[in-house]
Amino acid sequence: MAKKNTKSPDEMSFLDHLEELRWHLIRSTLAVVIIAAIALLLSDFIFDIIIFGPKSMDFPTYRFFCKVGTFLGIDSNFCADELPIIIQSREMSGQFSAFIWTSIWAGFILGFPYILYEMWKFISPGLHPNERKHSRGFIFAASFLFFTGVLFGYYLVAPLSINYLATFTVSKEVSNNIDLSSFIGTVRTSVIACGLIFELPIIVYFFTKVGLVTPEILKKYRKISLVVVLILAAVVTPPDVVSQILVALPILFLYQVSIYISKRVLKNEAKKEAKLAAKRAKKS
């Protein structure tokens, strides 16, 4: 194990910081590997229940939209008995690769709070005591947003994408025999992309702290951001308006929350500066 560094951040050289970062990355990687090893033992549950869950028409999202469609008198693919797709593996090592990589991604997702913890341990010594005090909830808030995004991607984006693409056809002569890696990639991209997108308020918080973002900038580029969000929604969802709106709405909400957070950060910074100015005036 690495020797514990007792130097203060101001006394540490660039190489000392690199060494410190190296051990944080090593511990984060070990955490992912350990969780991935556990995931390997639970592969039946991960694949049959989680990964292939959106393939079954008993999936909660399909049942919900089927009930909504029935209530509104609209025929939809959500009420079908089964999706017209067959999952296949066309490579010799296809299933083994899926087995390994899915476990690794599961390790990353489930180990995300610990990865944040290691990041925080690396960053926090460089913060002022007051900044550390006001940032105590960082790991909880970031983890909560990430897992909320993961659930949003799994229960909304992934099933909408799978249902639309599985039922879309250019001709009855073509059957949908989906490659295993393609199906897993759709679920994985939906889940992880949404998890990271939901970190927007945390990113804006730190960007505001270092002066890269202000509420005025966020408001100024709100229209451009709306276009970017709609493009992003179009990328991670099937090409239908309803799905894109369902994905775009929470992202736009997070954008508005980010503006509020940016305002709060600047307001707190202004209060600190006012207090420091008052102290200096008293001393002089």
Image (spheres, grey):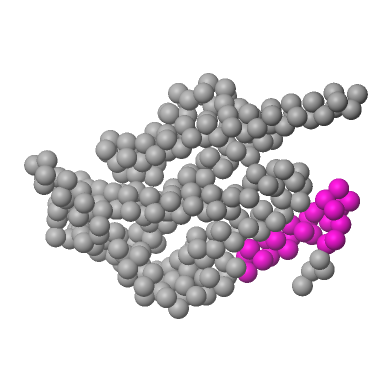
Residue, far front: 282
Residue at (50, 60) in percent of width and height: 109
Side (left or right) of 49 relative to 83:
right
Side (left or right) of 3 relative to 143:
right
Residue 11 among magenta residues = yes
From where the camera sits, is residue 171 visible? Answer: no
Identify the image quadrant of the C terminus.
top right
Residue, far left: 73
Residue at (67, 53) in percent of width and height: 120
Highlighted range, magenta: 5-30
Query: Camera-side residue: 253 or 232?
Result: 253
Q: Give residue 13's position: percent from left, percent from top.
A: 87, 51
Q: Give residue 106's position: percent from left, percent from top.
A: 48, 65
Query: Camera-side residue: 236 or 41?
Result: 41
Q: Main secondary structure of the magenta part?
A: helix
Residue at (36, 69) in percent of width and height: 47
Q: Give residue 123's position: percent from left, percent from top.
A: 71, 50
Q: Give residue 51's position: percent from left, percent from top.
A: 35, 64
Side (left or right) of 211 relative to 219:
right
Residue at (47, 72) in percent of width and height: 39
